């Protein structure tokens, strides 16, 4: 008898047999039913396939009208989402809001602009090569987060653009299987602070109640000052923490597993294009937008950090924030150490927090208007 439920997949258990059932939802099979794929007779590929007929890519994509929401998946039963591939044409990625609902909870456990969820929040293509998220040419969005559910899983995509329809290509691969009692539910929440108040903080996550583990952060950072900006500490307040956190890092670039200003040279700010992009299994800075001297006036960065081997576990509650902190007179870096002083910054910070927790979860703060979300 095969007792393996097919969850927690890795190279070490690929040889194990299981009675878990593999299923897939796409525009060619919106129900995910066995033996029902490729049966469409109408769709966006009907004209190119007019000489071929049924079974020849009749429905590779779907449209989302302006100010409308499309249900990508509505699955009943017990199982887990195992992989999502998605590509979209039309609106900006921050006008497309991805939401996920578990076990008939009325409010979403995931509510994030599409690009930010897939570590591509600055709109332009950037190659992301990590374990749970990858972005491939040309702007193919992929995630491998395991997302278990016991009763129902529902995934939607809203188009907030009032003028442009969205054309979305997608495939959601999942398994029907028994979910262990100690599996928590996947969550992701977006927040933006623009600008961060002087001596203030950007809140990455707050208001979480229940037991769970924090598993990752994606962050975009827009600079409003000259010089280096990444000295702020990322802090995790868990359970009984009040004024001071249990986990406190040493700086922003350190949290994203880089160092020394992401500069492979001498960290001198006059070096042209000193910032260096990188993308690894667990952390990266794949997005660096550099000023062009005309209309693109500021540096912007997109960064991710996954807590896969070091999840941050909490039993009652969790709050996460980051300081916006740079240097005064960074051009005098080679001078007297005693003359150096930090500078609290008033930058533009957006973030996505990724975590697992028990249900019910608390409703998220209301997502701001599309004009506030736009990076410009």
Image (spheres, grey):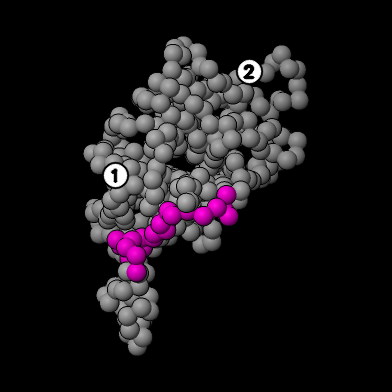
Q: Earlier in the sequence, mark 2 or mark 1?
A: 1
Eyeballing the image, is 359 above or below 139? above
Quarter-wise, where is residue 273 in the image? top right
Would residue 329 be found to the left or right of residue 234 on screen?
Answer: right
Quarter-wise, where is residue 257 in the image? top right
**Labels in figure, total:** 2
Residue 171 visible: yes
Which residue is identified by label 2? 341
Magenta residues, as a range? Answer: 13-35
For label 1, the crowd category at 10 Å Cα-Cα, with few meaning under 14, some 14 to 19 and many 20 or more, is: few
Residue 280 lies within the magenta run: no
Eyeballing the image, is 196 above or below 369? above
Residue 197 visible: no
Task: Between residue 320 and residue 324, name the one nearer to us.
Answer: 320
Q: CA distance from mark 2 to mark 1?
A: 55 Å
Residue 21 lies within the magenta run: yes
What x and y, as percent, mark residue 218?
49, 39
Helix, strand or loop at label 2? It is: strand
């Amino acid at each position: 008898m095969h007792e393996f439920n097919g969850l927690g997949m890795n190279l070490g258990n690929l040889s194990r047999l299981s009675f878990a059932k593999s299923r897939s939802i796409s525009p060619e099979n919106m129900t995910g039913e066995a033996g029902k794929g490729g049966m469409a007779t109408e769709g966006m590929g009907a004209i190119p396939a007019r000489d071929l007929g049924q079974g020849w890519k009749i429905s590779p994509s779907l449209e989302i009208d302006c100010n409308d929401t499309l249900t990508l998946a509505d699955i009943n039963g017990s199982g887990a989402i195992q992989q999502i591939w998605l590509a979209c044409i039309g609106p900006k990625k921050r006008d497309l809001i991805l939401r996920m609902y578990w076990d008939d909870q009325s409010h979403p456990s995931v509510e994030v602009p599409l690009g930010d969820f897939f570590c591509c929040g600055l709109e332009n293509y950037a190659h992301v090569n990590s374990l749970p998220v990858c972005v491939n040419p040309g702007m193919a969005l992929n995630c491998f987060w395991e997302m278990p559910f016991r009763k129902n899983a529902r995934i939607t995509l809203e188009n907030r653009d009032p003028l442009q329809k969205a054309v979305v290509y997608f495939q959601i691969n999942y398994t029907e299987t028994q979910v262990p009692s100690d599996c928590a539910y996947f969550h992701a929440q977006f927040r933006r602070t623009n600008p961060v108040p002087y001596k203030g903080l950007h809140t990455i996550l707050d208001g979480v109640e229940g037991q769970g583990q924090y598993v990752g952060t994606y962050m975009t950072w827009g600079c409003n000052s000259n010089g280096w900006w990444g000295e702020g500490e990322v802090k995790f307040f868990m359970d009984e923490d009040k004024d001071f956190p249990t986990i406190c890092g040493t700086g922003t670039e350190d949290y994203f597993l880089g160092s020394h200003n992401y500069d492979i040279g001498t960290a001198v700010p006059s070096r042209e294009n000193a910032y260096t992009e990188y993308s690894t299994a667990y952390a990266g800075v794949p997005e660096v937008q550099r000023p062009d001297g005309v209309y693109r006036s500021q540096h912007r960065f997109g960064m991710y950090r996954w807590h896969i081997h070091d999840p941050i576990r909490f039993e009652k509650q969790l709050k996460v924030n980051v300081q916006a902190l740079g240097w005064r007179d960074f051009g005098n870096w080679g001078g007297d150490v005693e003359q150096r002083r930090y500078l609290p910054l008033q930058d533009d910070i957006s973030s996505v927090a990724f975590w697992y927790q028990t249900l019910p979860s608390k409703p998220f703060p209301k997502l701001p208007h599309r004009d506030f979300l736009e990076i410009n």
